[in-house]
Amino acid sequence: HATLREIRRTPEGIKIAQRAFEEFVTNNDFLLPREVVYTGCGSSYFLSQPLAMATTHRGGRGVALPCSELLYSREYYPVREPELLVSISRSGETTEAINALQSLDVPKFALTAYESTLSREADYALVVPAHEESVVMTHSFPAFYFAFLQLLNTSFGQETYDAEMASELTKEILKNEGYVREITEEFDFRNVIFLGSGILYPVALEAMLKMKEMALFWSEAYPTFEVRHGFKSVADDGTLVVLLVNEPFDWHEKLTEEFQGQGARVLTIGNGDTGADYFIGFPEVDELLSPILHLPLIQLLSYYKAVKRGLNPDSPRFLSKVVKW
Ligand code: F1P
């Protein structure tokens, strides 16, 4: 399957991202301002969220909105006159992402995989050619994220990440592919809940979408501890809870136990175990970088769930690669 090949290309995607970033800074006299609105559709919207969070975390102010909300309901959001509007679209041809560029009268920036309508209509374009055959976005997501983080670091006076090191870390993480496959084979879960906090919450949302797109499988995502407030009632012995963490602490352990008490099984992914049924560990990395390690794993989980269900994740029913109006 193209999808599996593309997930396995994550380490290469990071290198492509680094080259795209370097080319961008060589050709453009441009630094990101402090107040930035990010927008996109689908996975590109879920990517706009960690970028907005990273902007805020680094001392700026980032807001993320789906393109359609920016177009038709923006008066309900804290969006007035930001210093920059970043529109994200893998194809660069999604109607909403292109139209969104016109929604605010501020400088416009495109983050895309192609020289496209979006890149031509924006004032600046960071083109990250992590191309994909598959309908669903996989390795392009961490690649876009990494390229833009590098630009954010440079703009906000921080050191950039060592791209070789980042690429190598994703290569290491992909060695868990066999284990992820085993989990899906051993436990034929009936539903799945993804949990993440801070920068890992949008990663949980993206995981939820990947499950729906690739495996046509119902899934949910919540900010980690929010799940205890009602949502956990659906978790039983057919449920897999995927806990995305960076630095686990006692609440993560209590949460794991609580779900296990309901009969659910927990898969913890992060740099410490929480007493989970399944655990994938990785080294300590800068928190903002951690999504590039979590993403390939949750993509593999969706991929192998699709395979287990006898589906072809390359071309899911009812979906198309580019959504036009
Ligand atoms: C956005 C998107 C994808 C999704 C599906 C439909 O595309 O929502 O995220 O996987 O293929 O389109 P794009 O604007 O990033 O090209």
Image: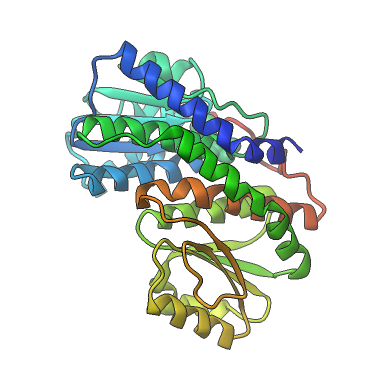
Give the quadrant of the N terminus. top right
Name above or below for residue 300 compared with residue 90.
below
Task: Evaluate whether residue 202 shows in this view.
Answer: yes
Of 282 and 115, which appears nearest the observer? 282
- Please state the horizontal and vertical placement of residue 209, each as a whole percent of the image: 56, 51
- Please state the horizontal and vertical placement of residue 303, each as a whole percent of the image: 69, 50
The colour style of the image is rainbow
Task: Evaluate whether residue 127 shows in this view.
Answer: no
Q: Quadrant of residue 284?
A: bottom left
Judge left or right: residue 108 versus residue 20.
left
Judge left or right: residue 239 versus residue 163.
right
- Please state the horizontal and vertical placement of residue 71, each as a whole percent of the image: 34, 35
Q: Quadrant of residue 187?
A: bottom right
- Please state the horizontal and vertical placement of residue 108, each as a whole percent of the image: 29, 23
Of 302 and 146, which appears nearest the observer? 146
Count numbered badges in the picture.
0
Residue appearing at x 36%, y 52% in the figure = 287
Image-quarter location of ligand 1: top right
Residue appearing at x 50%, y 33% in the figure = 14
Judge left or right: residue 264 versus residue 141.
right
Taking the view exactly as shown, the residue that stands out farthest to the bottom is: 261
Residue appearing at x 51%, y 37% in the figure = 167
Name above or below for residue 162 compared with residue 107.
below
Name above or below for residue 128 compared with residue 277.
above
Residue appearing at x 49%, y 75% in the figure = 274
